[in-house]
């Protein structure tokens, strides 16, 4: 090359890219005239202009260094004085952050994590649901660390979720940034790619904080990210911005609802700690009614401030009605109105996701599964999964565990409002029907897996669109019951409230065996009382009798023996009227348990024998096994231990034949009791261990405790005091967890056994 090495090399690179001087000007921000002068060698190149040209040409590192080296050595005597590009930009130090958030409280963990990222220069993507305080967190932290970015702070509200429904276009945001950086309007190219290149060039070798607030999605954000290692971008969005995390290595920072302490501090900062201290219960209730959502808490605080004569108790009363809660949180400003803020996310949904969101409002529980959601919507699992994923992405749902979905009460209220406005009564009722079918048919199948000989209900077939969980074995059945348990009572209540009375009593009875084993007896009493009334309204005496028997079983576990007896006798009367031999037998068997608990052993034995005769007449082998074990147990109470072994051996054989693991466990316990009283301690301990192994597999907690207590007594009788102490110590936490009245007696026994 001649004396114009730089110009010739620049021209060569431009032609290799296939661009005219005008095209290079548009992409680099350097004017076409300047490029022409540089290529002709009539001007000494400035390194800042060379960097812009090299970046626009996307030169590889070797070629870029060649161009920079040529620029450094190429001195042209005829060089004309030319003002540097963006003369004002060198001095411009933008300070665009919004005002600091007054009274900002909480978020200590998030602030610590943000500060820990300062030296890593990673893009931070703060995400969370509407009203959770993403912007407040980002702005508050940005003010705290602004001095770390002496070259300025850029801020833009991208209006990704906004009343206007029109997000800011990336080109518009970049123009605003370039203006703030002092770039003359005539230097700003028309194309987005060229604008982004110029923007990144302006940030090169500078320390600038860029806050991109309220982003719609990754495509809106990506052109606005700085390329300089000295800059930091903070993005807030309701979207998870997964693409940004994958392609740009952004660090996700989820923001959840506030803790109770954080929410209390927020209210205290707005209302003063004295006002909260004057009405602590109302303050706590307001926090719960606002579901720990900062926006809702701030609105409540504003209402309390505007009407100081109104007590916090009165405010809480207004918020208690879920249907009116959103209206009570409306203060006439759509920018901070909870419903309006939620609506900005709702409007972005596809039709399928919006319909799913509306129908979720009829689900009564705190969390629901994929299959329950699919049943609500009447779609397949794949379609439901897509809709739910979209709702999670929009932060209108959370996924606290894989395949489990939830939202807080304010979103539930908004969802219900949308359902009332956009779904017909018929559509909402059909969704309830499908959902109840899902729970009823899955629960019934699960209880039969837990104990195959269980009596079967006569269920109507599930409606089209209902997904029944395919449970493979008793372990999966137990897991399903355990996971769904928090919603059972609410589902039974919903069934009665919406006129599905048959579903109500059948669902309550389908979950009863699980509740008995798991120790949920108090809740079971309430649920069975609802079920009895539902069966009566439905005109189904068989359902009444079944529910009364289950109520009696719950009363027995709670030690309410008079109530149990009354309930079981009512069931027996109905069963006799219906000619239901199996129902009669079950009532007699349970009445025998009541008599035993009341100390009337002869009556208990008589009830067991009556139950056996009825089961035998009905050809019910599993029932016969239960009755034989009951007879054997009562024989031990009457001191007839050898006879007890005979009856229990028959029971064990029958239980094994019909596949009743729970019955087998009960019978092993009875056999252990008989051997113990015969002085056969080794055989007794072996029987108890068989029982314990089965009870543990079955999740039967109260029977485990009972058997452990008896095993301890056998160890004690055999002189093994350490073994006795160990067995009782294992039983104690079970009884304590069940709030069982025997826990205190056992605790005393455990303490005494330590002193031996």
Image: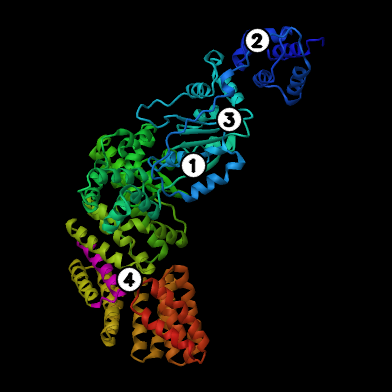
Task: Measure the alpha-carbon separation of dots 2 and 1.
Answer: 43 Å
- Neighbour tally class for label 4: few under 14, some 14-19, many 20 plus, Cα within 10 Å: few
Q: Is residue 665 above or below residue 34?
A: below
Q: Nearer the viewer, mark 1 or mark 4?
A: 1
Task: Measure the alpha-carbon separation of dots 1 and 4.
Answer: 75 Å
Going by the image, does 181 lie left or right of 299? right
Residue matched to label 4: 619
SS category of the residue bearing label 2: helix
Residue matched to label 3: 226
Span highlighted in magenta in the image: 540-561
Going by the image, does 1 lie left or right of 178? right
Q: Nearer the viewer, mark 3 or mark 1?
A: 1
Identify the mark nearer the N-term, 3 or 4.
3
Q: Is residue 78 above or below residue 695?
A: above
Identify the mark nearer the N-term, 3 or 2.
2
Residue matched to label 2: 34
SS category of the residue bearing label 1: helix
- Identify the mark at residue 141; answer none if there is no mark: 1
| Type of secondary structure dominating the magenta stretch | helix
Quarter-wise, where is residue 622 in the image? bottom left
Identify the mark nearer the N-term, 2 or 4.
2
């Amino acid at each position: 090359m001649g004396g114009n090495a730089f110009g010739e090399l620049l021209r060569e690179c431009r032609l290799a890219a296939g661009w005219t001087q005008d095209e290079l000007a548009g992409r680099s921000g350097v004017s076409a005239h300047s490029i022409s002068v540089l290529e002709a060698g009539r001007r000494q190149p400035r390194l800042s202009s060379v960097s812009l040209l090299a970046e626009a040409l996307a030169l590889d590192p070797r070629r870029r260094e060649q161009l920079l080296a040529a620029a450094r050595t190429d001195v042209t005597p005829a060089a004309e004085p030319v003002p540097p590009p963006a003369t004002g930009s060198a001095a411009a130090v933008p300070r665009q952050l919004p005002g600091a958030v007054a009274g900002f409280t909480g978020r200590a963990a998030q602030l610590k994590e943000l500060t820990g990222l300062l030296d890593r220069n990673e893009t931070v993507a703060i995400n969370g649901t509407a009203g959770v305080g993403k912007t407040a967190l980002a702005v508050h932290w940005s003010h705290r660390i602004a001095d770390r970015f002496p070259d300025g702070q850029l801020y833009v509200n991208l209006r990704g979720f906004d009343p206007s429904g029109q997000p800011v276009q990336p080109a518009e945001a970049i123009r605003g940034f370039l203006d703030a950086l002092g770039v003359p309007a005539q230097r700003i190219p028309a194309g987005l790619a060229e604008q982004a290149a110029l923007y990144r060039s302006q940030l090169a070798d500078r320390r600038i904080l860029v806050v991109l607030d309220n982003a719609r999605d990754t495509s809106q954000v990506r052109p606005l990210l700085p390329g300089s290692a000295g800059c930091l971008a903070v993005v807030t969005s309701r979207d998870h911005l997964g693409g940004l995390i994958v392609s740009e290595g952004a660090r996700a920072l989820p923001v959840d609802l506030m803790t109770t302490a954080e929410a209390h501090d927020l209210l205290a900062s707005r209302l003063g700690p004295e006002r909260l201290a004057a009405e602590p219960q109302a303050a706590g209730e307001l926090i719960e009614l606002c579901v720990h959502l900062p926006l809702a808490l701030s609105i409540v605080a504003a209402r309390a401030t505007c009407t100081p004569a109104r007590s916090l108790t009165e405010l809480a009363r207004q918020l208690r009605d879920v249907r009116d809660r959103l209206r009570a949180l409306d203060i006439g400003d759509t920018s901070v109105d909870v419903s309006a803020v939620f609506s900005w996310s709702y409007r972005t949904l596809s039709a399928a996701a919006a319909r799913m969101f509306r129908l979720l409002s009829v689900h009564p529980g705190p969390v629901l599964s994929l299959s329950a959601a699919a049943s609500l919507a009447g779609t397949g699992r794949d379609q439901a999964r897509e809709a739910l994923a979209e709702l999670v992405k929009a932060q209108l749902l959370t996924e606290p565990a894989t395949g489990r979905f939830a939202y807080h009460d304010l979103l539930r209220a908004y969802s219900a409002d949308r359902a009332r406005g956009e779904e017909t009564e018929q559509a909402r009722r059909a969704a309830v029907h499908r959902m109840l079918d899902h729970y009823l048919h899955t629960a019934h199948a699960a209880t039969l897996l837990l104990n195959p000989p269980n009596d079967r209900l006569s269920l109507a077939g599930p409606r089209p669109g209902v997904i029944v969980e395919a449970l493979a074995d008793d372990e999966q059945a137990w897991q399903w019951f355990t996971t769904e348990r928090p919603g059972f009572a609410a589902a039974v209540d919903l069934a009665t409230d919406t006129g599905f009375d048959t579903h109500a009593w059948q669902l309550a009875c389908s979950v009863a065996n699980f509740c008995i084993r798991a120790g949920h007896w108090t809740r079971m009493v309430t649920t069975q009382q609802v079920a009895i009334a539902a069966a009566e309204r439905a005109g189904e005496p068989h359902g009444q009798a079944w529910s009364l028997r289950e109520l009696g079983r719950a009363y027995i576990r709670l030690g309410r023996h008079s109530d149990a007896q009354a309930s079981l006798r009512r069931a027996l009367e109905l069963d006799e009227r219906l000619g239901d031999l199996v129902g009669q037998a079950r009532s007699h068997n349970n009445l025998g348990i009541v008599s035993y608990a009341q100390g009337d052993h002869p009556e208990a034995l008589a009830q067991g024998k009556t139950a056996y005769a009825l089961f035998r007449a009905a050809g019910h082998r599993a029932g016969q096994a239960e009755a034989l074990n009951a007879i054997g147990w009562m024989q031990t109470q009457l001191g007839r231990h050898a006879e007890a072994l005979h009856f229990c051996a028959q029971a064990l054989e029958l239980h094994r034949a019909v596949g009743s693991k729970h019955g087998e466990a009960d019978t092993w316990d009875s056999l252990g009791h008989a051997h113990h009283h015969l002085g056969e301690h080794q055989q007794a301990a072996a029987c108890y261990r068989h029982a314990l192994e089965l009870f543990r597999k079955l999740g039967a907690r109260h029977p485990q405790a009972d058997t452990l207590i008896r095993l301890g007594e056998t160890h004690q009788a055999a002189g093994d005091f350490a073994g006795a102490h160990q067995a009782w110590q294992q039983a104690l936490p079970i009884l304590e967890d069940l709030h069982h009245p025997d826990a205190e007696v056992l605790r005393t026994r455990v303490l005494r056994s330590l002193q031996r």
